[in-house]
Image (cartoon, rainbow, N blue to C red):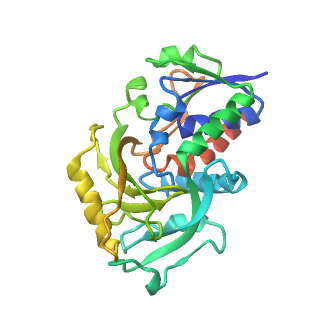
Amino acid sequence: MKSATVIGSGIIGLTTALKLQEAGYAVTIVAKEKFYETLSSKVGAIWFPFQIEPLHKAHQWAALSYSEYEKDQTNDNGVSFIPFTTVYNTQSNTNWISVLPSGSVRIAKSDELLNEMTQAHISTVPLVEPLHYLPYLFKRFKSNNGTFIKQQIYTLEEASNLNNLVINCSGLGARKLCNDNDLKPMRGQILRCAPINLPSYADSTTKGALTYLINRTNDCIIGGTDYENDWNLKVDPTDTKLILNRFSKFNSTKNQPEILEEVVGLRPKRPSVRFELDKTYQNIFHNYGHGGAGFTVAWGCAIELVKLQCS
């Protein structure tokens, strides 16, 4: 049997491992932390191609991922499809709506716009609840005879010795592993709150003033921040106030949300996703730098990666 090793156990690593298993590989995941300690466990995880390049590839990966989530809906794995309002303006790139299935996206009517929204799309998109979905994926991986090793890999030379095929899905960790200074953190702070009777939405039209609400089964996520090259992992009370102020702009009831938890994570932002064989160690394939769109493109990247390896 062919074998492969995946570095990283977040959403990119897990989906890559599962698609390799489907293609007949015996797969080992090597990671410095288990899935529940990764950035992937902290995020809102709604299908939305946010802060990812190149866009033409991201849209292809997003479309493939959309189809995968359609096949992966069950009552207990954290995947559902919800209406999602996305604000846009004349500067917005809205090409991503072209990859949605026919009938799943439309222009919002005036009475569907929240306070201060002037134009938006309403689309039906996958929502993934990481604390349900990641354990589900890991269980699938293990049931397919997958092996997990908790170990940090420090150099590409060390990585190259792991297997004949090594997939680097180490996210922001690739900055040190690959000496990749193009990879930078994009700091996100979010508020996990009690459920709120408002539609899920995102407004990314103003750089540095990202705001969104994502309704989940038992809570909701209010965000957020998109500060580039910011390594601060501590909760910033100033950012909490900013997030609440932005939320109040769209909240006609003016009710303050009940905050259950404040969460900070560092998205792996890169000018372009690194999706290629390493030039020195040609048994290593890099798959990292997905910005704020990891859950949106993960399955698509995994599908294309396996197709490349098997062609």
Give the vertical position of 110 relative to 227 (above or below): below
Q: Quadrant of residue 264?
A: top left
At x 75%, y 23%, the residue is 2
Asked if one can make out residue 309 in the rendered structure from this viewpoint, the answer is no
Residue located at (62% from left, 46% from top): 299
Please identify the quarter of the rendering in which residue 306 is found.
Answer: top right
Q: Does 303 sit above or below residue 214?
A: above
Q: Measuring from the top left, give residue 286's x and y in whole percent.
A: 53, 32
Q: Is residue 189 above or below residue 96?
A: above
Q: Quadrant of the C terminus?
A: top right
> Between residues 211 and 303, which one lies in front from this camera angle?
211
Q: Is residue 101 above or below residue 227?
A: below
Please state the horizontal and vertical placement of residue 8, each as a whole percent of the image: 53, 29
Residue in the picture at 55% in, 17% down: 160
Can you name the residue that lies furthest to the bottom here?
A: 110
Is residue 143 at all visible to an observer of this figure? yes
